[in-house]
Image: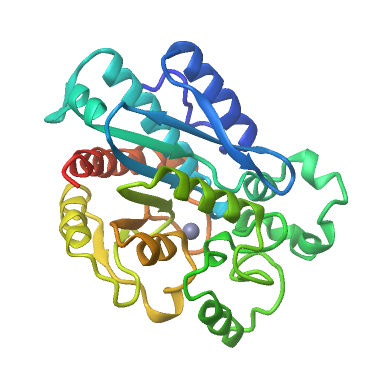
């Protein structure tokens, strides 16, 4: 892909994301940049909407800080989709104009900006004392940081089996804020989670996709909530990407965005673990292009499927 605005040569910080959104908006003034509220440190959590359809798909990325690659490929997709729409192109068999008119796609490219900034050692964060007592003992391995700036794993902070998530993680020795797996002092304790929930309630999406990394897997269910339509769509996403449609093990099954969405709305929601690199580490930039290609197919297919919901 020849991306003009979104570059794959630097780790994808919140500042780059903000600038890229402005550049994109300059090039394509027909969409608006909005936000769903602020992060703990007061950064605006940006969202944009592409498309004019009645059906609504919500794509969110980087709940987990060290999974900032999900933000980068989401932004690459946004640029591509804007270009395709502007040029009224058919693309890989997808009629982009038709998709645009039938489905509104909402994107939050970075749910956890403070966490991403911490993980990528943003100077503003590292040099101030705010929340430092939470992360300083992990200072040498911040690149593995998944949580938000308060040391809460945002994808364990939703009110869907939250108590069970706490129990499961306690068994693994997680009892306090830290780089990963701490579900918070209570469900929805975090401003980022609260913003996501309110945003979701306002827009009443037909389907949601949360991008995580990594493993090339697609999760489609929550406990015994198994929506047939979600399975069918999941099978199609599996087919276009080569990713594996699967169900999470019991210990990872609670308090995520997908879990909350499925339990509350009984509509399709997916967690997609993109790319493959070394276990526990961020996907490296060298993986950006190939991971993007896989994600592009998944998102186009998801938009196409959303029109029939
Ligand atoms: Zn994740």
The quadrant holding residue 231 is bottom left
Q: Position of residue 132 (x, y in %)?
A: 83, 56
Quadrant in the rendering for residue 82: top left
Q: Nearer the viewer, residue 231 or 177?
A: 231
Which residue is the extreme one toward the right?
A: 129
Q: Position of residue 235 (x, y in %)?
A: 16, 57
Q: Where is residue 156 shown, x and y percent of the image?
A: 54, 67
Residue displayed at 44% across by 64% down:
260
The front one of 137 and 208 is: 208
User: Which residue is at the far left?
Assistant: 93
From the top left corner, tell me how far across and down residue 88 is, in percent.
22, 15
Q: Is residue 149 visible?
A: yes
Could you say which is closer to the camera, residue 104 or residue 92? 104
Q: At 67% across and 44% down in the image, what residue appears?
A: 117
Which residue shows up at 51% across the image and 81% down it? 164
Q: Image height check: is 48 above or below 231?
A: above
Task: Give 308 or 23, whichever is nearer the viewer.
Answer: 308
Question: Quadrant of residue 303 in the image?
Answer: top left
- Residue at left offset 59%, top offset 28%: 18
């Amino acid at each position: 892909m020849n991306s003009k605005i979104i570059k794959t040569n630097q780790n994808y910080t919140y500042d780059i994301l903000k600038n890229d959104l402005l550049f994109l908006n300059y090039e394509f003034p027909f969409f608006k940049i909005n936000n769903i509220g602020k992060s703990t440190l007061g950064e605006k959590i940006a969202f944009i909407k592409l498309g004019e359809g009645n059906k609504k798909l919500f794509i969110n990325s980087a709940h987990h800080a060290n999974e900032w690659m999900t933000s980068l490929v989401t932004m690459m997709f946004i640029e591509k989709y804007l270009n395709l729409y502007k040029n009224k192109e058919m693309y890989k068999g997808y009629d982009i104009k038709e998709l645009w008119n039938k489905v509104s796609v909402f994107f939050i490219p970075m749910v956890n900006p403070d966490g991403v900034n911490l993980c990528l050692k943003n100077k503003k964060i590292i040099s101030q004392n705010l929340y430092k007592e939470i992360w300083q003992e992990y200072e040498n391995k911040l690149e593995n940081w998944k949580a938000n700036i308060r040391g809460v794993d945002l994808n364990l902070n939703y009110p869907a089996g939250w108590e069970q998530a706490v129990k499961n993680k306690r068994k693994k020795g997680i009892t306090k804020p830290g780089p990963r797996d701490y579900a918070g002092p209570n469900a929805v304790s975090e401003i980022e989670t609260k913003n996501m929930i309110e945003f979701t309630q306002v827009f009443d999406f037909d389907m949601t996709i949360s991008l995580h990394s990594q493993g090339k897997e697609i999760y489609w269910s929550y406990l015994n909530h198994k929506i047939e339509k979600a399975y069918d769509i999941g099978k199609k996403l599996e087919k276009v990407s080569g990713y594996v449609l699967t169900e999470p093990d019991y210990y990872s099954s609670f308090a995520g965005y997908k879990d909350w969405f499925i339990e509350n709305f009984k509509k399709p929601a997916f967690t997609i673990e993109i790319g493959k690199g070394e276990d526990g580490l961020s996907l490296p930039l060298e993986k950006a292009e190939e991971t993007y290609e896989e994600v592009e197919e998944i998102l186009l297919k998801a938009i196409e499927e959303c029109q029939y919901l």
